Image (spheres, rainbow, N blue to C red):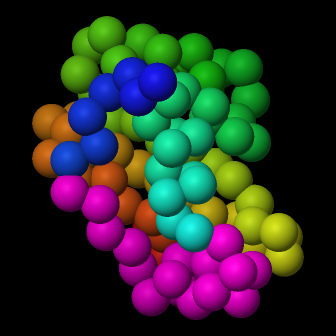
Amino acid sequence: MIRFCLGQTVATPGAIEALAESDQAASDFLHRHGSGDWGDLDIQDRQSNEDAIRNGERLLSAYRTGKGTKIWIITEADRSVTTLLLPEEY
């Protein structure tokens, strides 16, 4: 179940390349993010996301592709856009 609006979804060139290299779909990671599976975040960051859902703040998830590349997903506070990106592209 999706817990918040993702808005428009976009991806950086690095994220697109990482997904292609691992033969994975962006939708798999977007579904996890939208359902509140925050991936590789510590308990404090997970709680920050839970608070952000209620307070209308920015949301961040972190995952690894099957090839081990770290991908972040960020949903803006106004829920207008969700971006898949590599940490170094932030």
Residue at (62, 31) in percent of width and height: 37
Q: Position of residue 14 (x, y in %)?
A: 53, 85
- Write the residue at 75% across / 67% down: 65
Decide: is 39 above or below 8: above
Task: Give yes or no for residue 15 being in the magenta stretch.
Answer: yes
List x then y, in percent, for residue 59: 41, 36
Residue 21 visible in the displayed image: yes
Q: Which residue is more in the foreground, 42 or 54?
A: 54
In magenta, the rendered stretch is 8-24
Q: How many marks?
A: 0
Front residue of 65/41: it is 65
- Residue 87 visible at all: no
Q: Is residue 66 left or right of residue 29?
A: right
Query: Residue 1, how many percent across, how many down?
Result: 46, 24
At x 62%, y 35%, the residue is 38
Q: Residue at x 53, y 77 (%)?
A: 15
Residue 8 is left or right of residue 45, and the answer is: left
The quarter of the rendered structure image containing the C terminus is: bottom left
Q: Does the magenta segment cover residue 46?
A: no
**Left or right, residue 58 beside residue 44:** left
Image x and y of residue 19, in percent: 62, 78
